[in-house]
Amino acid sequence: MKKVTLILAAAFVMLFAGNAQAQLGVNFGFAPQTTTTTVGSSNSSASTNGYFVGVNYNKVLTGTIGLSVGVQGRYNYKSETTTVLSVSTTTKQTQFIVDVPVLFNFGLILSDNAHISIFAGPTFSYALSGNTNVSENVLNTSTDHPWYGDNSNSNQLDILGTVGATFAYQSFRIFGGYRLGLLDLDKRDKVKTTTNGIFVGLGYVL
């Protein structure tokens, strides 16, 4: 599945790159993530910091309506330390994700140099890796707990419903929005895990 996702991403980029009417943009930003797990009637949530960097191509379909397709890498991270009787235990969570957003956008021109737009669509998301590292200071132990693999209960593929807005001035863009995971990331029948989060970023059109 990982190879299929990457091949589709590369195909989208090459398709738009060869189109003279498509604009290439680069962007980066902050995208924290909340993961919610439901077991029966009980819910629990955990949050991580997230950062992303990527590229996108936007093609005008008609008038002020366009289609943006991109590829971005996302890194989620969280670190917590607890101390009991001088014994400190540090838990670090890391996750690397590839996102392929396919977003329709509708723009409104404010002036010759500025416009705003709203966007919505799916983002196809695939987790390349995920790990929890637990280290302890007295015995100097460090143990990794991979999230994915043959014996894992976690799914790597997700589809995110994505909405947001962009303000553009000349070649610069400021954008933000919200994403909601639509797939269950837990393989077990009686457990459901989903993600959601906001994102904000800066971009530049080349």
Image (cartoon, rainbow, N blue to C red):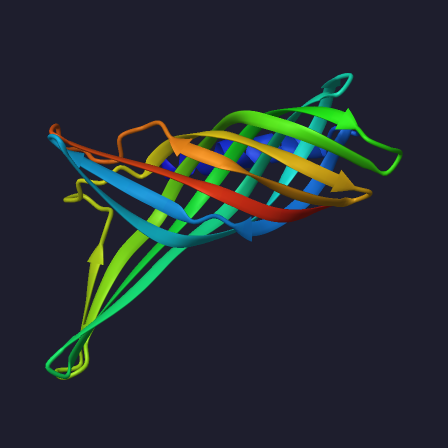
Q: Residue at x 55, y 40 (%)?
A: 71
| Residue 206 in view here | no
| Between 31 and 145, the one nearer to me in the picture | 31
- Examine the image and state in which quarter residue 168 appears: top right
- Residue 22, percent across and down? 74, 30
Q: Residue at x 10, y 81 (%)?
A: 85
Residue 3 at x, y percent in the picture: 41, 38
Q: Is residue 28 visible?
A: yes
Determine the residue located farthest toward the top in the rendered image: 62
Left or right? Give the position of 139 relative to 55: left
> Considering the image in quadrants, where does the N terminus appear?
top left
Residue in the image at 69% along x and 42% along y: 25
Residue at the extreme right = 112
Please determine whether, in this image, residue 136 is positioned above or below residue 41.
below
In the image, taking residue 35 as reference, residue 187 lies left or right, namely left
Answer above or below: position of 19 versus 175. Answer: above
Give the percent coordinates (x, y) of residue 2. 38, 39
Q: Tell which of 55 and 4 is nearer to you.
A: 55
Of the 4 image quadrants, the one containing the C terminus is: top right
Q: As drawn, is 94 to the left or to the right of 143?
A: right
- Residue 29, percent from left and from top: 56, 51
